[in-house]
Amino acid sequence: MNDLDKNSKTFEDIKHIDEDGMEFWYARELMTILQYSNWQNFEKIIDKAKISCENSDISAFEHFIDINKLSKRANNAEVEIKDYKLSRYACYLIAQNGDSRKKVIALAQTYFAVQTRKQEIIEKEYTSLTEDEKRFYQRNLTKKGNYSLNQTAKKAGVKNFDKFHNSGYKGLYNGETADDIAKRKGLRYREDILDNMGSDELIANLFRISQTEQKLKKDNIQTEKEANKTHYNIGKIVRKAIKEAGGTMPEELPTPKKSLKQLEKENKKSLKNK
């Protein structure tokens, strides 16, 4: 493994996913990786990056989000410190404005430039993807979203996660549980229902997932009963929105002929045979 691979993994390790499934980095964590020991000096780099952002006619406010965090001192006293939630583009601009003599800065420039370009391609070319490619893309987002939702639900007091997730499905699917959905789709025992959804159905579930997490946080839900109720209600709200928009109810959407697991196996097999 070369230095770039090692540092790329480090940049990945400090990446976070927000309630909307969007990735971000904390400035103070990035500061450590980029080998800056003084916050005041690093904030000067951030200010330069903000100027670069604005000079490109891009709103710095959307990419450099001010936040305050509590930090423990040696005597266990807590003090409020300034930090930023940074987009991938913001990290790229910070690396571009960093001390080019540092090897890790050059590595950061390469890493975030490549990752930013990948995302641009994804966003630009999404409409030209095949339905199966869109399914893989949306399924990846639901995996990230469910992981983040589970962390928030755990803090809210959820212990029975099957019941919690079924509450959301019941709201969105007019009373159907995950097992009901699986049976209706004709799936085998324990086969993942999300792997057997089309892109539109996955998008509906992704919206349910992200909005539930936001609601749990916003309302500071503290009991399992309230968390389940919240998930159910959000599912119903998403269902109502689909109906009012004249869309197709999720249970009426067609089930793809092949699951994503099956497509993955076929892709691997074809690559081996090449």
Image: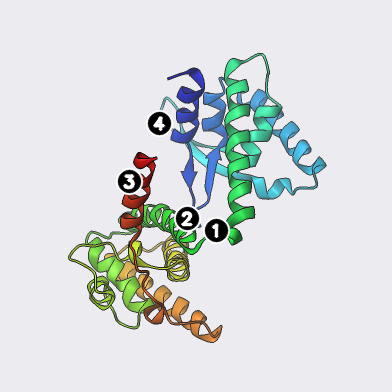
- Residue position for label 3: 269
Q: Nearer the viewer, mark 3 or mark 1?
A: 3
Q: Are marks 1 and 2 in contact (CB under 8 Å)?
A: yes
Element at badge 1? Answer: loop
Binning the other alpha carbons within 10 Å of mark 3 as few (below 14), some (14 to 19) or many (20 upward) gives few
Question: How far across and down, in percent of the image, does residue 210 sit?
Answer: 46, 62
Badge number at residue 129: 1
Element at badge 3? Answer: helix
Amino acid carrying mark 3 in the image: Lys
Q: Are marks 3 and 1 in contact (CB under 8 Å)?
A: no
Q: Is residue 145 left or right of residue 176?
A: right
Mark 2 or 4 closer to N-term?
A: 4
Mark 4 or 1 closer to N-term?
A: 4
- Residue position for label 4: 76
Question: How far across and down, in percent of the image, does residue 202 sit?
Answer: 43, 66
- Residue position for label 2: 137
